[in-house]
Each structure stands twice: as C-alpha cells, then as structure tokens.
Image (cartoon, helix red, strand yellow):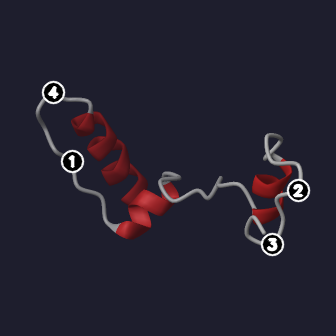
C-alpha cells in the first residue's frame, strides 16, 4: 500500500505546478538523501593546483 501511495505521488509530482509532498521516510526510500560528497581525502587529493596543500592549506 505504501509503495502504491509513493508511486501515485511520483506521478503527481510530474504534473506541472503540482507540489507533491513526501515525508522523510518516503524521500529516503526514493534516494533523496543519498550521500555522494567527496571525502576529506578525496578533496585534498583533487587539489592539483596546490601540491603542498595539507592540514587546512598550511
């Protein structure tokens, strides 16, 4: 039943001007809160223009 409700909300959300509301559990089920940010290591590793940037740029 819950999945049917979510499917209907997704259909409604495609209607121009309609503002479908999702509760936090529904949004999480749909992947709205998927974390895909860079880790601190990845961010430091990607700073090729600052080869000596470590420990907050010091």
Measure how far apart labels 4 and 3 are at the Cα level: 48 Å
Is any part of residue 21 visible from this angle?
yes
Q: Are marks 2 and 4 in contact (CB under 8 Å)?
A: no
Q: Secondary structure at mark 3?
A: loop
Q: Which mark is residue 16?
A: 4
Residue drawn at point x = 78 percent, y = 47 percent: 47
The residue furthest left is: 17
Mark 4 residue crowding within 10 angstroms, few (<14) / some (14–19) / many (20+): few
Q: Are marks 4 and 1 in contact (CB under 8 Å)?
A: no
Q: Nearer the viewer, mark 4 or mark 3?
A: 3
Q: Looking at this view, is 19 or 58 the one in front?
A: 58
Q: Are marks 4 and 3 in contact (CB under 8 Å)?
A: no
Image vertical order of residue 35 relative to residue 15, above or below: below
Q: Are marks 3 and 1 in contact (CB under 8 Å)?
A: no
Q: Which mark is residue 20?
A: 1
Image vertical order of residue 13 relative to residue 42, above or below: above
The residue furthest top is: 16
Q: Quadrant of the N terminus?
A: bottom left
Q: Residue 23's x, y, as percent?
A: 31, 66
Examine the image and state in which quarter residue 25 appears: bottom left
Please state the total of marks drawn on the protein image: 4
Name the residue carrying label 2.
52
Mark 1 residue crowding within 10 angstroms, few (<14) / some (14–19) / many (20+): few
Name the residue carrying label 3.
55
Measure how far apart labels 4 and 1 are at the Cα level: 11 Å
Q: Secondary structure at mark 1?
A: loop
């Amino acid at each position: 039943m819950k999945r049917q409700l979510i499917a209907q909300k997704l259909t409604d959300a495609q209607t121009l001007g309609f503002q479908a509301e999702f509760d936090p559990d529904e949004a999480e089920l749909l992947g709205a809160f998927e974390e895909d940010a860079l880790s601190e290591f990845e961010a430091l590793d990607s700073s090729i223009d600052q080869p000596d940037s470590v420990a907050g740029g010091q």
